[in-house]
Every structure is written in C-alpha cells, then in structure tokens.
Image (cartoon, helix red, strand yellow):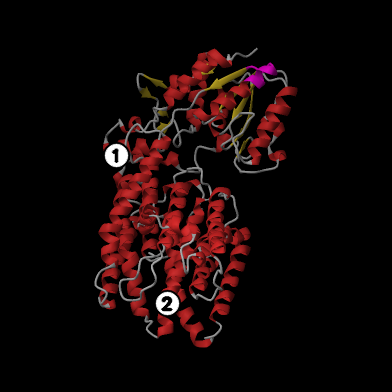
Amino acid sequence: MGLSAAPPPDGHVLKYRPDIDGLRAVAVLAVIVFHLGMPVRGGFVGVDVFFTISGFLIGSIIIRQVQAGTFTYAAFYRRRVRRILPALLIMLTVTSFAAYRYLLPSELADFGRSLVAANLSVSNFYFWQHSGYFEAPALSKPLLHTWSLGIEEQFYIFLPPLLVSIKKWFPIRVMMALAGVLAASLIISSTAVHRYPSFAFYLLPSRAWELILGTIIALDEFPRIPTKFLRHLASVAGLTLILLACVLFRSTTPFPGLAALVPCLGTALVILAGREQASVVGRLLSLRPVVFVGRISYSLYLWHWPVIVFCGLGMKLVYGLDRHQSQLMMFLVSVALGTASWAIVEEPFRRGRPDAAPRRVFAVAGAGIAALSLAGGALWLSGGIPKRFSPEARRVADYMDADSGHDFYRSNQCFMLTMDWPLPKFNVDECLKHDGHKPSILILGDSHAAHLWWGLHSAYPEADVMQATSVGCKPVTRQRPRQFAGCTRLMTFMLQEYLPTHHVDVVLVEAHWDADDIPSLTDTIVWLHSLNVPVVVLGPMLQYDAPLPRLLAISMRDNDPSIPRQHRLSLLEDLDAKMAALAGSTWHVPYLSLLDILCHGGQCLQYAAPGVPLQVDYGHLTEEGSVLVAKKIRSTGVIHLQ
C-alpha cells in the first residue's frame, strides 16, 4: 500500500529518498509480523506509517504541479490507476480462484460482496459494517486488508481539489488551512475511537489527518534542523516512536485516535530529518536489502494477507511444520509473491508509456473493475455456489458458525471472554458451587478447559463439577509477561486464595499447552502439592491447522477422507509424551493423554455422533464432543472421587 518513493516516470520528478523506501519496509514488515501472530502486537501501526508517507509523496507531486500550473486531474488519476490497479486486480483474480476452492458457501458469498467493494474502492465501508479488524471472524476474510487501500483511494479523490481550492482561495495560508483540516479530522478520530471504534478505524474522516500530516510536511515550510546532531537525534526519536508503538500497543488500545500520533509523528520526524542530508537512521533505512523490501512493499502488502488467511483455512504450503515454521513459510511465500508481482506487474505498468491517453487507461481499468465486480456479484447472489458441497457437507460445515456450539461454556460467567474485568464479575457462587455433600471436581484453565465442563458435568452426575476458566489463561501461578490483568487476577484468586481455604477433591488443569508452559506448570504443581490438593494434568487436545468442520466438508466434496489427517498437528505428540514423562518422574501426578483416548493407530476420532463433528474449530469441542470426551475420561479411571 502507499506510493513508491521512486521517481515518477513521467517527468514530475521528486528527489529520490531511499530512506523513505526503507521506512516503507519497516511499515510493511510490522504489519506482516502482526498478522502472522508474532509478538509484535502493535504492528498494525505500520498502516499509519504508510498513510503518512503516502500523504507526503502524493502531496509533494500535487503541490509542485499546482505551483507550476501543470496539474491536471486526468494526468493525476491516470498515474494513480497505473500505479495501483494492475497489481490489485491480479491479486483479486488469483484470490477469487482460491476463495472458490477453500471457502464454504456462506464465506464465498461474503467474499463476493467484499470483492465488489474492493473493486469499487469502498471496502473500508464494507468491513466497517461487517467485520471487526481484531476479531476472530476477520481471519476468514481474504480481502480484509483492502480497507486501507479504500482509505488511500478516497483520499486521492479528496486531496487534489482540496489543494487546488486552498491554493486559489488561501494562497498564502496553505499550511494553516491544511492544519485546520488535520485538526478537524484528529478531533473526529479521538472522539469516535471511544464511542464508535469501528467507524474511527475504517473510515476516512478519522484517518485523513494521518495523510494530511504527510502533505503538510510536503509543503516544505518547517524550519530546517540546524545541526547534524539534532538531525540524527530527530531520526532516532522518530524510529523509536514507531517501534515503541509496534511493541507497546495492543488490539485493546483505543485506535486510531490520539494513540496514532505516536507512529505518525515518528514517521514525520524521520522524513524531516532526511530532507537535506542523510541521518543516522536514514543511512540504516537506505541499506539495499531494506530499500528492496520497501520497493516491493505495495505488492507484498497485497499478497501477504490472502496467504495467511488461506493457510489458516486449510491450504497447506508444506506438511509437517510446527507453528513457527509455518509462520516463516507464510512469510517467505508472501515475499516471493510480492517480488513477482512487483517485477512482472507493478513495475512494467508503472514505467509504461508516459504519454498513454487517459481515456484509454481509464477504459482498460474500467473493464477490469467491471469484470471482477460482476464475478463478485455472481458469487454473492448465488449464495456462494452451495452446489459445490453436498447437503451433508453443508450441515457439517454449519458447526463452524461462530454462534453455534459454544453456549455450554458458560461464557462470561465461568468462562471469562473479556480481556480485562473486575474479578467480582466472575460468578463465584455459581461457578464454584459445592454443597459439601458431593465430591468436587474443579476445572482450571483456558478455553481448552472450559469446553470440558459440560461433558464432565454430564459424565459425573454424582459430583459438583466447578469451573474457573478464562480465554487464553493458563492455570499457572506464574503468568507470562504482559498477560492481561483479568487472567492474572482470576488465577491468583483461585490458586492463592480459594484453594488454600476450600476443600476440592480433584483439580483438573488443562490448557492450550505449548512447551514454554512446562516450567510454570511445574511450579504450579509444586504449589498445589504444598496445599495437599489432588491434581490431574490433562494433556494437549487433538488439534488441526484449520477448523475441523471445514476439513470434513472439503474432504466430502473431494471424496478424500485423508484431508483431516493431513492437517492434524502431529507435532503435539512430542509435547504430550514429554508431559506424560514429567508427570511420572517430576510432578508425581496422574496424567491423562487426550491424544491417546481420541487416537488409535494413527486414526483419530473426527465425529462425536453421525453428522456431528468432534470439534467446532481447530480444537474446541462441540457440545456432543464434550460429552464423548468426558465419557472417555471417566472410562480411564484417572479421576478418583471419595
């Protein structure tokens, strides 16, 4: 996204700034590592860096042409079309074929609507109405990232007449007039971010100030930085602000609003510091590998998100990879596709004949937009071409609906979904209900513990089955750094306050385990032993790299029953074996391998009942699956009740 810092090919030459290409590299890499789920939780601010850079580059071109009296709308939009549209249309076309292959009917219909919106440069309006950027359903929307292109393309419509009008009516007050527009947009953004956060995130009125900031810099009216030391200091401060936003911001940070000032002002400082001579950060950003990533950043941005989405939906790049290896593979594939798009599509079209008639350029572009819009409309109106799947496959796929299969968790009562809450909202009386006449079982952990409550409640009618669970919250005394406060408070309450003063016959600890949890789990078991609390550790749940209902539906469509097995996370077997060994040698607690009770001879249960998948997504159980697993747990005899 954004515009290349390379010189325009049609004579409107700007001084080439390799450091700006390097800054674009920082921005696109921040976005990609954020989308890959790596620990750069504020990487989404890379988009804001792009916006400020785009405002600077586009503003520079328009301002110089307006001042020279050579600006024409036809020439301006011809350049924008040639720069943006070819690579975008190619990505949309290829993504449409992948969507036909991997998306279920309801998802494909939704994709069709988003395809039309992306073609018409209004996808930010579409996703404003249909998707939260940080919500889980966004992970199945291959064109979600085009919202930012919609912002920029709408800005391209808004900026030229604004600058022409200001130049005409306020020729000596251009900066003041633009500052007024910036202030108005920033006020809208800082107000809406709290009351209408989706509006603030997706729509131009609350984002325009970020691009206007770059345009104000392009006026070249800021005082020069007088010394080399101050120039270096400004550049370091600017890059530091961007990186701090990447590291410290979260999906829960009210954004954009005033928080977006941090990366945008950081971008402005880096640009200003490199106006006359290279700064220390400018030299770093001008290194050839960094500049190359910046040069391909538009194409790289276009391709990275569809790659991530389709890999999450079941497309396998390479079999047998763990999570980190998969992240690396998705990154490398994205870079390869971005490089190919830049070299084969983006650069040839951008550097094509500068004298091409605008009417011809617009006609070809319009034909491409119309063709893809018609295709999107067909997908939408057909309901996602449901005949691709049998009725049985569609019924199985329906279990993947975000609103189905989760009522039995006792959400926001005993399974806390909000990222931060006052502990009194946890319903102690209901979730830890124990009348003293029955034996008690306490389930402690995250969602992989919560989905067992219903089944255990059914399988052990003679016991009070209690539950203290929270999203993403491991049942350990030592939470990971920057764990949200609600999780820490809940587990502190249960382990430090409740269990030392209340008798519980068995505590079941279960979570979405990974190898990094073992040290803190060991400490927790030692603590529970000191309280004389009987503990049973449950191993990792059977998991896939895509939702099981989707894999089952696709396997039915393709008549290939091996598809779910190909997507099973077999690497969990090593973790399961390690935990089983520790349970016997170090922890001295009963251990139950869920993989052992669900898999035999390389074959794992996929259905809880005829037509009912065992799991609703990559690993969470359906209601019927919870009952089936609980019965199997009971049959092992690992839970001893007095």
- Against 14, residue 560 (above or below) is above
Residue 242: where, in percent of width, then height? 53, 55
Q: Which mark is residue 190?
A: none
Number of other residues with Cα within 10 Å of mark 1, as a class: few under 14, some 14 to 19, many 20 or more: some
- Residue 299, visible in the rendered structure: yes
Residue 527 part of the magenta segment: yes
Percent from the top left, x then y, of residue 115? Answer: 36, 58
Helix, strand or loop under label 1 = helix
Q: CA distance from mark 1 to mark 2?
A: 53 Å
What's under tag 1, amino acid-wise?
Arg
297 left or right of 527 in image: left
Farthest residue, direction right:
501
Q: Is residue 278 left or right of residue 488?
A: left
Query: Label 1, on which residue?
Result: 557
Report which residue position mark 2 lands on.
Answer: 62
At horizontal 64% and vertical 29% (from top left) the residue drawn is 477
Highlighted range, magenta: 526-534
When the figure is inspected, residue 507 is found, relative to residue 288, above or below; the finding is above
**Rendered-image quadrant of the C terminus:** top right
Label 1 close to label 2 by CB (< 8 Å): no
The nearer-to-camera label among 1 and 2 is 2
Viewer-closest of 125 and 74: 74
Give the amino acid type for the residue marked by disc 2 in the picture: Ile
> Label 2's element?
helix
Decide if residue 638 is in sight here.
Answer: no
The numbered mark, 1 or 2, whose residue comes first in the sequence reads 2
